[in-house]
Amino acid sequence: MCALAVVAACSGDTDPKSDPTKPTSSSATPIDLTFGVYGEPDEVAAYQEVADAYNAEHPEVTVKIEATRSEAESMTAVETGAAPDIYLANSRNLHKLQTEELTQPVDELLDERGVDFGDGYQRGALLAFSGNNALQCMPYAISPMVIYYNTDLINFQAMRNRDIDAPSEHSTWTLAQFAAAAQWATQPKKKARGVHIDPTLDGLAPFVYSGGGTVFDDDLEPTATSFSSDGSRGALEETLEVLRNPHVTLTDKQLQRRSAVEWFEAGRLGMIAGYRDLVPELRKAKGLNFDVMAMPVLDDKTTVGDVTGICLSAETDHDAAADFLVHLLSVESVTTVAEAGYIVPANLEVAVSDAFIQPSLLPAHGSTFNATIRHIIPPPMVPDWTAVDEAVAQGLQELMDVPVLDAEEITTTTEEIDEASRAILSPEDESESPSD
């Protein structure tokens, strides 16, 4: 086997006559497998096409798709003991999957089948699913957060023609250029606003990291968020000058009427942040022209990422499930799913192909996703991301709501955010009473 200490590029000495796409199980007994997926109907349809191809090639096996609309719904099934044999999962749930023994490592199983999961995959994706010196799930997709912008409201060449600082490439731009673009897109005649960034950990993290701050107090085992640290607070002060500017951002009243994505789809919002899965929805918006940019830079290029992997249930039959996993990882299968437009493939060959780039479709600079992946700051292992998000939601909203906050108010609010997160991340510290 290839040992995986965090991440090792496994190239293995495999039999050149062996075919890793063929199953190793030799039993003629019919085998039923379930494959848990989530997403929009056309994304699920792509996975169904992949499963149908496998069923046609392997009459002794029947793979049935079990689909939900969200990863949260899928995880509920996994946690309640109704886990499919093979299922999609987000890397942010790896802590739960490991500690509750809901999955089994895949590196040995793939190595036995001659699958090279080293140099052919995004390193960050492999790291995201590595734990206990093994690859716990096989990375399938890795999307960096980027900025989507309306190309009818924001014209960088026109801005430069008027001596306004604007970016010349799509893989980098400054916070000042981002602010100028927000001002440019704010067009009263079109009733258009410039920008909206969600007041969430994901929404603010790229700006905090880029400005030299940290989102958590420890990269591996956090006990609290660290928004009140000097570096994080300084990055927030700089960023919030743009993000809470009432002249360029959506008002609370507007957000009550429509979501930020809906305003963007209507051509009334210049910029939003999001992952690759937003692309198919935006393509369906009538009359919308859009493109993507990397997240703006304060000091360093940074962003956050959404990483999806394929996991094997701890209870499933090793051979049959692992054989189907090999099929899912084939270039042909990944290409089928990539063509639906929702994922950035972790498989490098497919990621640079037209199946993903889709040069005839929006966004024109789809390669920006690939160029930005290496700047993803991986999240720490957190037992319950939903609980942390909910704990800090009110404080982050307060930071974004108030047009003018002085340094003392920002300090107070960020300290409250950190304390709220501590109650979730290290509740034992909260319950300890002072010693006499």
Image (cartoon, grey):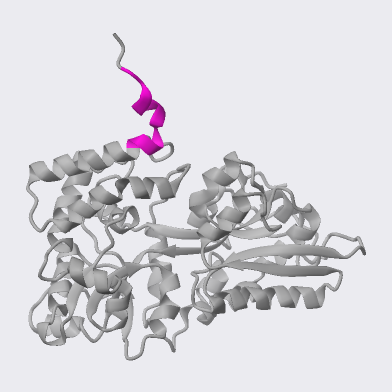
- Depth check: give the residue in front, 292 or 241: 241
Q: Is residue 81 above or below residue 36?
A: above
Magenta stretch: includes residue 430: yes
Expressed as whole percent of the image width and height from the top left, the position of residue 123 reads 51, 56
Specify the quadrant of the image occupied by residue 176.
bottom left
Q: Main secondary structure of the magenta part?
A: helix
- Quadrant occupied by the C terminus: top left
Q: Is residue 270 above or below residue 308?
A: below
Q: Residue furthest right?
A: 28
Q: Residue placed at 75% from the left, 59% from the top?
A: 321
Q: Which residues are magenta?
A: 422-433
In screen coordinates, is 280 left or right of 413?
A: right
Can residue 137 be seen here? The reply is: no
Q: Residue placed at 26% from the left, 84% from the top?
A: 267
Specify the quadrant of the image occupied by residue 249.
bottom left
- Depth check: give the residue in front, 26 or 253: 253
- Depth check: give the residue in front, 308 or 191: 191
Q: Residue placed at 52% from the left, 74% from the top?
A: 40
- Depth check: give the residue in front, 204 or 34: 34
In screen coordinates, is 366 left or right of 199?
A: right
Expressed as whole percent of the image width and height from the top left, the position of residue 43 reads 55, 75
In screen coordinates, is 15 left or right of 366?
A: right
Specify the quadrant of the image occupied by residue 280.
bottom left
Expressed as whole percent of the image width and height from the top left, the position of residue 398 reads 19, 52
Magenta stretch: includes residue 409: no
Can residue 294 be seen here? The reply is: yes
Q: Is residue 192 above or below residue 414?
A: below
